[in-house]
Amino acid sequence: MIKAIIFDCFGVVYSDEFGLVYEHFGGDLEKDAEFIEGTFFRASKGQIESGIPEIAERLGITPEDWRSYQDNIRGFNEDLLVYIKELKKSYKIGMLSNIGKRGLAKNMDYSVLEDHFDSIVESAKIGFAKPEARAYEVAAERLGVRLDECVFTDDRPTYIDGATAVGMKAILFEKTKQFIADLEKLLSSE
């Protein structure tokens, strides 16, 4: 029986449009995929404070240039937040985000997250990052549920694979309407 829904932050609850910013400054997402993934993984594990300085350096810009442009195109997925409020009436709601030491509070209005989520797990604060099993385990533990009682959603297939590997049900997030339809179908089959 499903008791909890766990959401990724960036690309799901909060749109930071990383790809658009990277390409705006002349980056090649495909060519640089390994560098980007490695940089963000180290930040998510708390090994470096943030991946943005390294990414900005690679692009020949300042971190301030990056943040200034990014701030103009990012924000909360308001339609999803409305749906999360409804889900919260029947399910425990969690967030599991790969984020560096600066944390989510440095990137957005944290009170919005606190209003919508029963538990918020930030990878650098626990020392484990998706797709490591322990990251998903901590997210479930903090909600007081077993792994097989959770549905996890993320916009990255690798993190979906990590969730299913530990026994969670998982939905790849592509668009809000698609996610809601997929989740409703899953919940109605329980």
Image: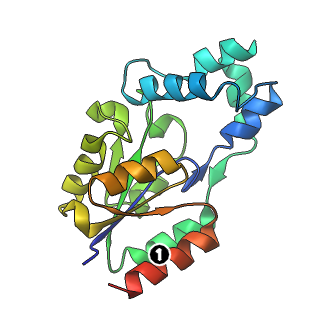
Residue 4 shown left or right of residue 116 in the figure: left
Residue 116 locus on image (x, y percent): 42, 63
Residue 28 locus on image (x, y percent): 75, 28
Which residue sits at x=52%, y=75%?
182
User: Where on the picture, by quarter, is residue 147?
Assistant: bottom left
| Viewer-proximal residue among 68 and 139 | 139
Local crowd at mark 1 within 10 Å, few (<14), some, or many (≥20)?
some
Outermost residue, bottom side:
188
In the rendered image, the quadrant that contains the C terminus is bottom left
The residue type indicated by label 1 comes to: Leu
In the rendered image, the quadrant that contains the N terminus is bottom left
User: Where on the picture, by quarter, is residue 107?
Assistant: top right
Which residue sits at x=64%, y=64%?
175
Q: How is the image coloured?
A: rainbow
- Tag 1's secondary structure? helix
The residue that label 1 is drawn on is: 183
Residue 134 locus on image (x, y percent): 24, 42
Which residue sits at x=76%, y=25%?
27
All told, the count of numbered labels is 1
Residue 32 shown left or right of residue 82 in the figure: right
User: Where on the picture, by quarter, is residue 65?
Assistant: top right
Residue 92 locus on image (x, y percent): 30, 68
Where is 85 relative to 53, above or below? below
